[in-house]
Structures are given as C-alpha cells and as structure tokens.
Image (cartoon, rainbow, N blue to C red):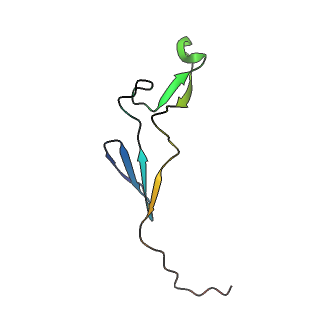
Amino acid sequence: MRNSITIRRWRIDLYERALYLQKQPNPRCADCGGKGHVEYGPGYHDGEEPYFAPCDCWDPFHNIRIPVGRTVITERYPF
C-alpha cells in the first residue's frame, strides 16, 4: 500500500517502515516546462515516438530515505 503527499516540489511517500522524500521537477524550467524530461531524436518533429532524457532540474533516481520505527527480533537464532 502506498501513501503519498505532495508539498510544493517535494513528494513524500510512506512505505512499510520508511519515508521517502523526492524532489519533483521544477514547474518553471525553461527546458522541460515542468514535465521532468526533454524530448529529442528523430521522432521529435516527424510524429513518431521521440526519445526522452531526464531534465537537469530533476533527478528521478535520487531520493532520501528516513527509517520509521525499529524492527525488534524476538527469536534467538542458532547461528
């Protein structure tokens, strides 16, 4: 189950035991116009499917993980 909230450019997701913070694309970016990706390649003007590249205003693979709670092990392991 995924719970998320967006505050300005930050999206906060709550998973099982962690909060994930991710910065969203800049809505005022001149290159992408707030979409987060730049279109280029042969299909850009021909009507075909263009290539996409992440814009410099946004890194889709960078997020901050904040652990919530603590896992307690109640069993003793034989090793």
> Considering only vertical position in the picture, is 31 above or below 70?
above
User: In the displayed image of the protein, which residue is found farthest to the right?
Assistant: 79
Q: Quadrant of the C terminus?
A: bottom right
Q: Quadrant of the N terminus?
A: bottom left
> Considering only vertical position in the picture, is 65 above or below 41?
below
Q: Nearer the viewer, residue 19 or 2?
A: 19
Kindly identify the residue that appears in the image at 61 percent across and 16 percent down: 42
> Considering only vertical position in the picture, is 9 above or below 33?
below
Kindly identify the residue that appears in the image at 59 percent across and 87 percent down: 76
Q: How many marks?
A: 0
Residue 44 relative to residue 32: left or right: right
Residue 17 relative to residue 52: left or right: left
Residue 16 relative to residue 78: left or right: left
Residue 68 relative to residue 5: left or right: right
Kindly identify the residue that appears in the image at 31 percent across and 42 percent down: 8
* Residue 43 percent across, percent down from the top left: 58, 17
Residue 51, by quadrant, is: top right
* Residue 21 percent across, percent down from the top left: 41, 52
Kindly identify the residue that appears in the image at 52 percent across and 23 percent down: 39
User: In the displayed image of the protein, which residue is found farthest to the left?
Assistant: 7
* Residue 63 percent across, percent down from the top left: 47, 50
